[in-house]
Amino acid sequence: MRTRQDSESLEEKILAPYAMKSKDSGGREHREGPHDVRTCYQRDRDRVVHSEAFRKLEYKTQVFVIYEGDYYRTRLTHTIEVAQIARTIGRSLQLNEDLIEAIALAHDLGHPPFGHAGEQALNKIMASANLRFNHNQRSFDIVTRFEKRYPDFDGLNLTKEVLVGILKHSTVYDKPEDSHYNTFVDEGPTLEAKAVDIADSLAYLSHDIDDGITSGCIAGEDLRESRLWKKACQRVDAALEAKNKEIFKYQIVKALIDEQMRDLQAFSSKRLKELDFGSSADVKIYNYKNPHETVIGFSAPMNEEREYLQNLLGEKFYRHHRVIRMTDKAKRIIEDLFKVYAQTPEQLPETVYRREAQHNENEKYEIICNYIASMTDRTAIDEHKKLFDPCEKV
């Protein structure tokens, strides 16, 4: 049987000097003894998978609302895809795959129902009260406060490296949030966290194309101006499109991912050789001092190609009338729920809004925001029916 010590010794042998080793972790807020078999990051991964927030990702959507069909990606399938891509990146660069997986599986726990439409609605509402909603911050709150699984502490008591990776997760859609958590203001993320960031961006672009084509909102012709799309098409038998459009779609998405991955691995390997990090501690210091420098990422030409395709996708897909109709409806549901709860917070469950407590307006807004953000698409739709449909049973 392989023990934890055996796994830690194996990390020393097979991981690069700049990789985050389990034995070097900054530890947990609440002291716990080491496990006999699992490393600290393996335990973190398992705790995330068993959390209530992770299970709810199955019914939280990306672009298409849950009732649009079973094929489209949910937060859960997206999260699994990000973890898979990030682990592939980590394996090629000799990083700690267990740490990567733990961060990847937790990175979207804080998302509200209805994807970015729900987030935009909550942002707007909270801004009206000079507050804010940041899903990185909420993911952090979930794993440090809201999950109740242990008798001696709130949250999941994850390691420092996972918490920093969650809080400082950064993509086009995800903004790092550390202003409220002075504990980690001076902490730079690991390379494993950076691998998750870039895997998230890669997954978004490639898989939104898959969902867009499947829905009929876009077609291959809409993307032919993109050099990246053309490269992918050149790698697939052109006759296949006429024979079997479904297989052609899958092959194109596969080629898109592979084109990006090849560039990413080549560019990142070159950067790591140039920077010549001696340890994971050196990485953290560098990332703290140079938050906008790319260590794991794409070359400049690939970044340009990706940005062009992303803009094309935004114009052709995200602004399609079906998508806009869905997102506007989703925002209205969020706004309606928030308005009702704000006017009569006693409609909230007593476990959420304690009747005897004297909450000020900011506290009330925070409670309502967290309650709505914890909902799945299905729960939010059902709750809206109960509150606004006179024929619906309460």
Image (cartoon, helix red, strand yellow):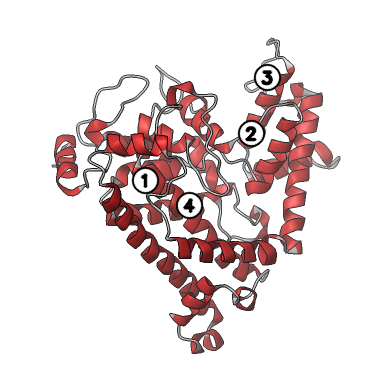
- Mark 1 lies on residue: 101
The residue lying furthest to the front in this view is: 274
The amino acid type found where label 3 is placed reads Glu
Dot placed on the residue nearer the N-terminal end, 2 or 1: 1
Dot placed on the residue nearer the N-terminal end, 4 or 3: 4
Residue 200's tag is 4
* Quarter-of-image position of residue 246: bottom right
Identify the secondary structure beneath mark 3. Answer: helix
Mark toward the viewer: 2 or 1: 2
The answer for how far apart the CA atoms under marks 2 and 4 are is 20 Å
* Percent position of residue 18, x then y: 26, 43
- Mark 3 lies on residue: 363
Identify the secondary structure beneath mark 2. Answer: loop
Dot placed on the residue nearer the N-terminal end, 1 or 3: 1
Discs 2, 3 touching: Cβ within 8 Å: no
Instruction: Answer few, some or many: residues within 10 Å of disc 2's Cα (few below 14, many 20 plus, some between 14 and 19).
Output: many
